[in-house]
Structures are given as C-alpha cells and as structure tokens.
Amino acid sequence: MKNFYILLVILFVLTTSFKTKKPAYLLFNEKGKTVKYEKMVRQLEDADIVLFGELHNNAIAHWLQLELTKDLHELKDSNLVLGAEMFESDNQLVLDEYFSGLISQTRFEAEARLWNNYKTDYKPLVEFARENQLRFVATNIPRRYASLVNSEGFEGLEKLSDEAKAFLPPLPVLYDPELPAYKSMMNMEGMGSHVSENFPKAQAIKDATMAHFILENWLPGKLLIHYHGAYHSDNFEGIYWYLKQHNPNLNIVTITTVSQEDVSELTEKNTARANFAICVDEDMTKTH
C-alpha cells in the first residue's frame, strides 16, 4: 500500500510539473480573447484588404501566411490578389515576366533583388500565386529612393525623373509626424544622434508606396492580402492609415504577429495592436 501511494505522488508530480498542452501559437482578437482560425477566416473573407503583419524570421507566421492564402483562394478563387513588402515596385516587370513564362525561375530569382530568406519564407507564396494565375503585386519603394528620403527628406524625390516617379505614390506625399509610430522613431534607443527628422519620413514613404500600389491593384469584389513587417500596420497606422486617407470606406482587416514566453494570454502591450494577433512561443525556431 505504501508503494502505491508513492507511485500516486510521483504521477501527481509528473503531471503537474509539465504543461500537458504546449501550443506553438494561439490566435487572439482585438480584445485579447482567443479565437479559432476558422472564425478569423470568415471575417477575412468579407474584407477588401487584409494586412498581414509578420515577424520576418518567424516560422509560424510564414506557415500561416501560406495556409491562409490557400484557404482564402478556396473562397475567393480568381478574386484573390497578393502583394508584398518584399518586392520593390520597379521589380513588377520581372515578376510579371516570370508569371507569364517569358523568363525562367532562375532568371527571375537572379534579377529580382530577393530577400535572403526568400526561398524558405516567400517563394512558397510566389509559386502558389503563379500556379493559380493570381496577381502578385510588388508594392515597396525601391530602397534607393527610401535612402534618398532618409538623407534629403521628401524634397529629394522631386529631383527624380518622371520614369523614376512611376515607382512612387503621387507627390507630394501625405505625412503626419504626430502619428505614434513615426513619432516614436525619433526616440529610438541606441540610435543617438543618428536620428534626424527624415528618419521617420523614410518609413512613411515605404508605407505610402505600399498603400498606393495596393490601391492601384484592388477593385471592388476583390480581396487583396498583403504581407509585410508587423510594424507597417500595427496599431492601425502605417499602411492602414494611408489606405484610409485615400479611401475611408475600405473594409481592412489587420493581423499582427507577436512573440511571448507564455502564449496562453496576450500581454497588455500586445493587445489591440490589430484585429487579430498570432501569439507565438518565443522559443519557436527562427527561419534566419
């Protein structure tokens, strides 16, 4: 009998010392309540634009991007459009040539100035769009022009040729330096004297450009899903703000990705950052 009780104690310790469930991630709504994936998909189906904010090296976010895109394609078919920060607007031609079969995959990947993690994280999205004949939009500003804004402000863009300006939103660009996302950039830790008033402008021109090309490629009845770093749409700023300035009637749903030690409950800091939050265990393997 004594050994029986000892065994019960051991079993109790083992079952209470370790979590019986260790989810890699949980989904939360804007109020910080857990939500099922299927419910999120139903809400996204009715949107005009979905802004999917990722952590660039987060494996769960990249997996969910692909799975969500597949599921939305099942619902929207050819009325689904894809777009991404990871492709600069002057690469739209080479992207279109690859999709139409004019150039090979090898040539496309050699010439498109792809991110280092393209093959693991973004190539599956590109290939899915190509195989299903979906439009894929290169939305981001060419980095050389973002650098120009960082050094000369928006005024530097006025010096560009008309050909170059085709890769930008119409000038002059709307800009609100009081938006928290931009204002906080002036006080970023570790930046010291390197921060100038042009630093947040370089971020804003990216947001404005992405919003511009999203709108250029969206039509009523379509659903455009856009992939980007979460900071470009968190707190309903960035791309979201620019889209609403141009068309306040758009039905936009935002997704953010956050990382926490404990995924069972969103921290106060991570609550209400987006319509939906993907809360990922901070020990999750990074893609790069």
Image: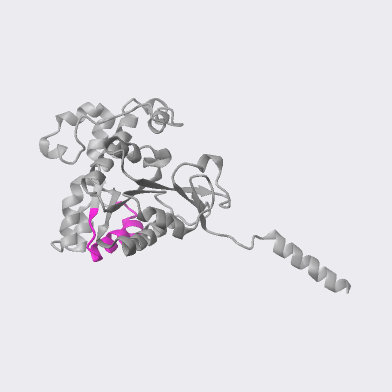
Q: Is residue 288 visible?
A: no
The image's colouring method is one colour
- Quadrant (top left/top right/bottom left/bottom right) for the N terminus: bottom right
Q: Position of residue 211 (x, y in %)?
A: 28, 41
Residue 169 or residue 249, whichever sits in front: 249
Q: Position of residue 136 (x, y in %)?
A: 24, 55
Decide whether residue 177 is among the magenta residues.
no
Q: Position of residue 238 (x, y in %)?
A: 35, 38
Secondary structure mostly seen in magenta is helix
Q: Is residue 255 above or below residue 189?
A: below
Left or right of residue 93, residue 265 in this image: right
> Which span is picked out in magenta?
115-136
Q: Is residue 69 above or below residue 33?
A: below
Image point (35%, 53%), residue name: 46
Q: Is residue 267 visible?
A: yes
Query: Picture quarter containing residue 5?
Result: bottom right
Image point (72%, 64%), residue name: 14
- Quadrant (top left/top right/bottom left/bottom right) for the C terminus: bottom left
Left or right of residue 116, residue 63 in this image: right
Residue 152 or residue 244, whichever sits in front: 244
